């Protein structure tokens, strides 16, 4: 790590630009002279290398004197081992050549570190080729691939000849393919290598070969680089002739050693030895100064006005424009007219290839160059003659929220990132200086600037985290997990080798989403739909829509509309959306463009009309700017659309692509709904003067979203839309506010959303209240399939669901009570007999006859409770009665359980139903064991002048009317009214 606080940093520049990351690669004049050889010398060198390459092992120390004689002149220290063969002798890496080759030959995994400019990226591939390996060089971005391809090929031109060098070195990325069957050094982006592993290409072509994978710039913690590292590590583990080299300028070697240790020791990776080769050296040092009280603008005006080329880093595009404005204002305040002596350029991740070439060109004669960049410019391109770098130490980084939705958040750069930015200085000239400054603050007024400054105080290098949070933790992994499903191993296993493991819950949640859109089956294997989706280089939601069009056999014109739309939406939308951007793009829209998908299609069709055969990149750029389109996103959309159309087998020039009809737009929306239906939202009212939307599956939503300001979709009450959920932050009055939005809105139809939810069993079946009824001895009800608050199809009669609604259970109990089966009748018989005994005898009497361990009396209420309990298990009345029968058997419910036969006979004898009173047989009633009669004649009453008793001594009372209302019971022979 570089020293700081106004000291010297151990940065060494390369004099020839061999590791330039840009379009241009310009070696020094002295280096060109050293590479000049005769045709005979080159032929001898080439013949020597071929002979060595065909041998099983290449050992530089065993080269013959003749072979050594054809090597370019060497200049090394006296105690250094003599260096031979390929390689640039002006770079520090040459001093470690034999160490590198030896480490790779004797270890399956090697870590290489070295300062920017040490030559690790350009030289190690040549060393490994010389040692007999097929070499895959994998930097993180296309522009680096282009630069390395040009640089390595140029160096080999002088040593092997142009024809042989061109055959040996190839490159491949999404924007360019330049490969040859004889390629021995293949330079590619990480995702290309990942797909080659997923498709089995590496296994088929290189399984038995001596092959090395150089995964470069690992310090950036780029998602695809880490996945490429994981794929390569797993493959190297299984193939004895394969080697893996992880290279980086700044590196968390301990973490990486642990992950890569699994290649040789899966059980105890922490004990595995993973050698680290540190390439020291950078010819020119860089001073680092910390300026806590100055912004980059202030520091530049104070210290850098004399530099021919300066580089200022800030967090984002909005800040870039502010830096330019503030710098011009500050220069003019110091000396009127002085800003005319500077040429200001912007460098960020949204530049087109045409713009990148303009960034690298020299400044106008007599002007000093000031380039203002986002951290995307910290690697990938080298600007010549930069002597001063100013950074505000911040970045707008994409961070996933707790729900996994992305958003841009301004954060502090890590130590390694700041060092990378400052390392842009002094790469090809002496005298590099780096300034770490206070963050740039934007505000409408001085007061708001001061308030927001509290959010971002100055942070010294020591106060920063050593490394940035790995990108893999803040990226939607859907596409990666889908592609990985084509391999023989699971993504969880891959994660063990990436350097940064992903939480299993995150992976499982992503697989759940992929199952929901039909890409994976229940055991997370790739489905036919998922297999087709992997053909298209867009987000899974969009590739699912493309597959739906194919499966529905849409005509070529419709498929072309889908391809153009998907490519534009995948870029995030073609128009400029930054505050203050114009809206000329709206003139390109048709009247039917009432959502963002149809609007993007209109823009793509308008661009196609403007793309004539002889249109230059500059003209394409100017056309995009004239209509307030983002040139870089337009460029990407064109590239992606071309790939999709090619994979669909469609030649767009053969199709009439005028504006789509209303019906064609409807089909497009329906097909894209296949991948978007899980992100369906409904308008839920107005809050703070904005229409808000809630997820249809969250009836009690606490988080609402608004349609993004850049959308063409107009809010409507109860409107149903699908869109990509995002959030963004904004600084207001010293606070960071978060706004949740829906981006790239698609109008959807509820019946189509429901159809796709039904296909993957995502609907819930909700009973319709009051619909339960009996049908042939079965209880049935009508249910409504629901996806969130959307009704799916018509209500259906349901007989087979395991979960029986309570209303249906109640209906089955009601029916069974009205239509009792044999078991229920038997239970009722026991309950009724027990009730009769309680009626004709007192509780004291019953205790005399009751069995010693008899349970509590069974009642009709108990029977109903038992029915309710078993009604949750069956819909069939006959089965319900069978369950009662088994219940009686298991519980032993019979009348004998309560009273034996002798007791029952005795209790019945003691409580006669008829008794002779006054010479007339009279019916006897009982009330909890107390006998009474209700109607007797006057003659009976006249004869019964004394109390009447049963045989067991209980008195029989006479129930008579009270004077007024009610009744009372009296003894015979007592005074009272005669009962009617």
Image (spheres, grey):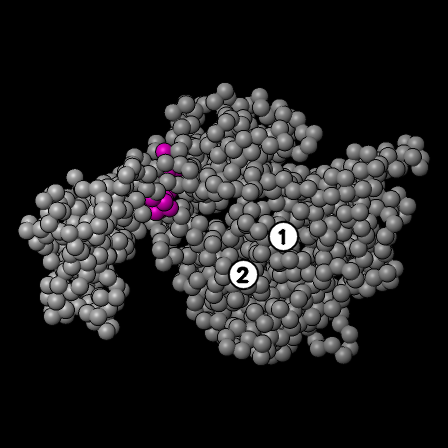
- Of 836 and 936, which appears nearest the observer? 936
Task: Classify the position of the N terminus by image quarter.
Answer: bottom right
Q: Secondary structure at mark 2?
A: loop
Q: 706 above or below 102?
A: above
| Picture residue at 63% right of the left edge, 78% below the top | 61
Residue 576 located left or right of residue 517: right
The x and y percentages for residue 275 are: 62, 75
Q: Which residue is mark 1?
A: 144
Q: Secondary structure at mark 1?
A: helix
Q: Which mark is residue 502?
A: 2
Question: Which residue range is magenta in the image?
Answer: 751-765
Specify whether residue 752 is painted magenta: yes
| Picture residue at 31% right of the left edge, 35% below the top | 793
| Picture residue at 86% right of the left edge, 52% below the top | 291
The x and y percentages for residue 804 are: 29, 49
Q: 271 above or below 962?
A: below
Q: Is residue 119 visible?
A: no
The x and y percentages for residue 141 are: 60, 51
Tell me which corner region of the image, top left, top right, bottom left or bottom right, holds residue 279: bottom right
Specify whether residue 166 is painted magenta: no
């Amino acid at each position: 790590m570089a020293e700081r606080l106004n000291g010297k940093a151990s940065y060494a520049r390369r004099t020839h630009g061999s590791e330039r990351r840009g379009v241009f690669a310009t070696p020094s004049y002295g280096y060109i002279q050293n590479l000049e050889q005769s045709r005979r010398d080159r032929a001898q060198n080439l013949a020597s290398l071929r002979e060595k390459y065909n041998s099983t092992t290449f050992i530089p120390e065993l080269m013959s004197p003749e072979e050594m004689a054809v090597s370019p002149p060497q200049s090394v220290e006296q105690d250094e081992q003599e260096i031979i063969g390929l390689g640039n002798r002006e770079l520090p890496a040459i001093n470690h050549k034999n160490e590198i080759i030896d480490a790779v030959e004797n270890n399956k995994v090697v870590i290489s570190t070295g300062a920017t400019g040490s030559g690790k990226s350009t030289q190690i591939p040549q060393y490994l080729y010389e040692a007999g390996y097929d070499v895959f060089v994998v930097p993180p971005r296309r522009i680096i691939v282009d630069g390395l391809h040009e640089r390595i090929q140029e160096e080999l031109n002088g040593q092997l000849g142009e024809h042989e060098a061109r055959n040996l070195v190839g490159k491949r990325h999404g924007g360019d393919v330049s490969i040859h069957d004889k390629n021995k050094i293949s330079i590619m982006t990480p995702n290309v290598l990942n797909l080659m592993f997923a498709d089995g290409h590496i296994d088929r072509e290189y399984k038995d070969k001596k092959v090395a994978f150089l995964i470069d710039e690992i310090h950036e913690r780029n998602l695809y680089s880490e996945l490429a590292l994981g794929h390569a590590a797993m493959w190297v583990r299984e193939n004895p002739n394969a080697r893996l080299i992880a290279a980086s300028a700044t590196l968390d070697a301990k973490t990486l050693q642990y992950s890569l240790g699994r290649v040789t020791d899966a059980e105890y990776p922490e004990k595995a030895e993973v050698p680290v080769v540190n390439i020291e050296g950078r010819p020119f040092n860089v001073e680092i100064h910390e300026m806590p009280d100055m912004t980059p603008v202030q520091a530049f005006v104070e210290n850098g006005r004399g530099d021919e080329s300066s580089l200022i880093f800030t967090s984002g595009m909005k800040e870039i424009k502010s830096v330019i404005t503030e710098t011009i204002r500050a220069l003019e305040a110091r000396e009127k007219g002085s800003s005319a002596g500077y040429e200001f350029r912007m460098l960020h991740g949204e530049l087109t290839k045409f713009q990148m070439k303009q960034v690298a060109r020299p400044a106008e004669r007599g002007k000093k160059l000031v380039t203002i960049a986002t951290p995307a410019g910290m690697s990938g391109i080298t600007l010549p003659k930069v002597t001063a770098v100013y950074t505000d130490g911040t970045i707008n980084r994409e961070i996933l929220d707790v729900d996994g939705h992305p958003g841009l958040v301004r954060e502090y750069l890590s130590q390694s990132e700041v060092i990378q930015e400052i390392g842009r200085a002094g790469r090809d000239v002496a005298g590099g200086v780096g300034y770490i400054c206070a963050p740039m603050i934007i505000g409408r007024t001085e007061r708001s600037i001061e308030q927001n400054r509290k959010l971002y105080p100055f942070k010294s290098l020591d106060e920063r985290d050593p490394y940035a949070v790995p990108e893999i933790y803040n990226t939607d992994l859907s596409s990666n997990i889908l592609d990985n499903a084509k391999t023989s191993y699971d993504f969880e296993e891959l994660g063990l080798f990436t350097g940064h493991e992903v939480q299993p819950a995150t992976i499982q949640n992503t697989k759940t989403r992929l199952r929901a859109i039909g890409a994976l089956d229940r055991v997370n294997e790739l489905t036919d739909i998922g297999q087709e989706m992997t053909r298209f280089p867009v987000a899974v939601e969009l590739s699912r829509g493309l597959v739906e069009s194919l499966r529905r056999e849409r005509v070529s014109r419709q498929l072309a509309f889908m391809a153009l739309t998907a490519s534009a939406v995948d870029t995030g939308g073609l128009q400029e959306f930054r505050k203050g951007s114009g809206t000329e793009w709206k003139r390109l829209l048709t009247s039917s463009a009432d959502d963002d998908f149809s609007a993007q299609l209109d823009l793509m069709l308008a661009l196609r009309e403007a793309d004539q055969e002889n249109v230059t990149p500059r003209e394409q750029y100017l056309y995009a700017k004239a209509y307030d389109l983002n040139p870089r996103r337009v460029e990407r959309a064109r590239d992606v659309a071309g790939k999709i159309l090619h994979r669909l087998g469609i030649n767009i020039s053969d199709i009439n692509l005028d504006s789509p009809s209303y019906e064609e737009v409807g089909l497009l929306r329906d097909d894209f709904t296949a991948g978007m239906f899980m992100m369906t939202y409904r308008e839920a009212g107005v809050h703070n003067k904005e229409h808000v939307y809630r997820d249809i599956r969250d009836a009690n939503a606490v988080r609402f979203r608004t349609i993004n300001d850049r959308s063409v979709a107009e809010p409507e009450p109860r409107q149903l839309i699908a869109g990509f959920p995002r959030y963004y932050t904004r600084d207001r009055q010293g606070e960071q506010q978060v706004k949740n939005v829906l981006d790239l809105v698609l109008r959807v139809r509820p019946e189509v959303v429901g159809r796709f939810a039904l296909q993957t069993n995502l609907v819930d079946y909700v009973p319709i209240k009051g619909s339960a009824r009996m049908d042939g001895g079965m209880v049935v009800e009508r249910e409504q399939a629901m996806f969130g608050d959307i009704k799916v199809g018509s209500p259906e009669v349901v007989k087979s669901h395991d979960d029986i609604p309570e209303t249906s259970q109640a209906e089955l109990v009601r029916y069974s009570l009205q239509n009792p089966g044999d078991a229920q009748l038997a239970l009722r018989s026991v309950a009724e007999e027990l009730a009769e005994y309680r009626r004709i005898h007192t509780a004291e009497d019953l205790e005399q006859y009751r069995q010693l361990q008899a349970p509590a009396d069974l009642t009709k209420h108990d029977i109903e409770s038992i029915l309710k309990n078993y009604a949750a298990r069956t819909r069939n009345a006959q089965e319900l009665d069978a369950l009662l029968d088994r219940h009686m058997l298991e519980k032993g419910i019979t009348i004998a359980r309560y009273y034996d036969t002798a007791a029952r006979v005795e209790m019945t004898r003691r409580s006669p139903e008829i008794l002779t009173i006054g010479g007339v047989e009279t019916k006897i009633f009982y009330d909890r064991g107390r006998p009474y009669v209700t109607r007797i004649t006057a003659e009976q009453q006249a004869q019964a002048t004394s109390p009447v008793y049963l045989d067991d001594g209980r008195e029989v009372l006479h129930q008579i009317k009270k004077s007024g209302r009610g009744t009372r019971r009296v003894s015979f022979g007592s005074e009272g009214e005669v009962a009617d």
